[in-house]
Image: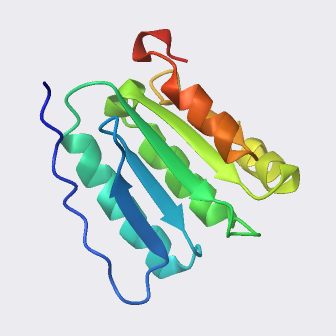
Amino acid sequence: MTEIKPLNWTPKPGVGLSVVRRGDGGMTLTFADLSDATIDDWREFALEHLLGLSGRTRNLYDLRSVKDIPEKAIRAAVEANSDPSARNIRLAVVVADTKVADAIRTVAALALPETAAAMKLFTDINEAEAWLARPLDQIP
C-alpha cells in the first residue's frame, strides 16, 4: 500500500481557503473568497506542493462559493499550472456557473502550455468527481 503524503497545510486567519487530503492521495481545495490574502496563500502552498510532487495525482478546486473570479486569481493559477511538475496533475475546477467558467476559459486560454496539468472546468461537483475518478493513465 502506498503511504499518503502529509498535507503540510495550516489554516490562517483572514484566508478564505481550506485544504483536505483526498482518499486517492490528491487534495481538495475549497475557496470561500479570492482576496489577495487567499490568492497569495494558495499560490505559496501550490508552488511548494509542486516541488514535492513525485507522481500522478488528482486535485479538486471547489470555487462554487466564489461568484466573481478576478483576473489576478486566474493568472496566478495559470502561472502555477505552467510549472513542468504540473503535468502530473489531473485538476477538476468546480465553479458556480457557466458565466464564471467562461471567464476562466477566456483568460486561461492565453497562457496554458503543453506542460500544464490536465484541467477541466465543471459546474457540477459530481461530474468533476467522476472525471477525477478515471484511471490516471487516462490523462486528460
Residue 61, percent from left and from top: 53, 51
Quadrant of res 127? top right
Q: Note whether 62 is above or below 106 in the view shown.
A: below
Q: Residue furthest top?
A: 137
Q: Note whether 91 is above or below 77 in the view shown.
A: above
Please give the count of numbered marks on the rendered protein.
0
In this image, 77 relative to 74: left or right? left
Residue 55, percent from left and from top: 25, 25
Residue 36 visible (yes or no): yes
Residue nearer the viewer, 26 or 102: 26
Of the 4 image quadrants, the one containing the N terminus is top left
Q: Note whether 85 is above or below 22 in the view shown.
A: above
Residue 24, percent from left and from top: 34, 34
Residue 129, percent from left and from top: 57, 37
Residue nearer the viewer, 52 or 134: 134
Q: Residue at x 32, y 82 (%)?
A: 12
Q: Residue furthest right?
A: 99
Q: Residue at x 72, y 49 (%)?
A: 104
In this image, 36 relative to 88: left or right? right
Q: Residue at x 12, y 35 (%)?
A: 3
Of the 4 image quadrants, the one containing the C terminus is top right
Residue 111 visible (yes or no): no
Q: Residue at x 73, y 45 (%)?
A: 124
Residue nearer the viewer, 125 or 139: 125
Quadrant of res 37? bottom left
